[in-house]
Image (cartoon, grey):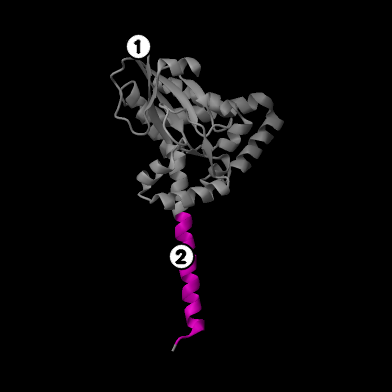
Amino acid sequence: MYSEASASPRADESAVNAKDADASTRDRVLRTVLEHGPITAAELGRRLGFTPAAVRRHLDRLESDALIGVKDVPQQRAKAGRPARHYVVNPAAQVRLGNENGRLAADAVAMLRELGGEDAVKEFARRRAAEQEERYHERVQAAPAGAERAEALASALADDDYVAFTRVVDVSTGTHAMRSLQLCQAHCPVVDVAREVPEICEAEAEMFARLLDVDVRRLATLAAGGHVCTTHIPLGRDAESVVPEKRTRITISKKQERTR
């Protein structure tokens, strides 16, 4: 005989399992936006194997929760119809993805500034970068100079939860192609501290330059409001030591370069 009392717990359990599965899937979508953004819904669907309707449902929920937003991306060619929406993570997503202790660390640094002054804060940033450099040095220096060394640095950063990767950038000058890399960090475990102590980002960029033995240039940081920390790494003209593309290839024409 049918028993409402016995059926109800099973129904509740199924509902909880479905909710958990939905949240887990949404976290996969969020992390994919984090690692590959700016990214379109179509590209998300291809990477995750989701139907357009499923992707749209999760994107709408993440957008309504203010975890992702839409970024204007220049189109290479004019296309008929509405331009595709490109999604990036918002600062709130950094907390959800692993900065739970960031506020505590930021408060500790604020107290360090109060007790020891700016010199103490700068020394903290310098020592932190020096410790990272010491850990990364052997791994990065073992790779050939150029793109492969930058990939080794990205891999070391990724192991420290920075979600780091590289992007190849080709700038056409007519007769030559100037090739460079962008070292991207889509997540920063110390972003809350870096917002209070910009010297952390400065010391980190200087550490990158020493490890790679090139002059690098910081283009954007999460701490300053960017959706990803981006560091420009020059490779030279017609560089041949470029590893196979692992993420997104960005091609910038000479005309676009002048208007940036």
- Residues shaded magenta: 2-24
Majority SS type along the magenta span: helix
Query: How far is the residue under mark 1 from the one under mark 2?
Result: 58 Å
Name the residue tied to disc 1. Answer: 174
Instruction: Say which of 233 and 76 sits in front.
Output: 76
State the SS at label 2. Answer: helix
Residue at point 31% right, 23% down?
242
What residue is pinned by disc 2?
17
Q: Residue at left 52%, top 45%?
A: 98
Quarter-of-image position of residue 249: top left
Residue 20 located within the stretch drawn in magenta: yes
Within 10 Å of disc 1 (Cα), the crowding (few <14, some 14-19, many 20+) is few
Q: Viewed as shown, does residue 83 lie left or right of 143? A: right
- Residue 142 lies, in percent from the top left, at 32, 26
> From the viewer's perspective, is residue 191 above or below residue 61?
above
Amino acid type, residue under disc 2 in the picture: Asn
Above or below 161: residue 113: above
Outermost front residue? 80
Residue 247: which quarter of the image?
top left
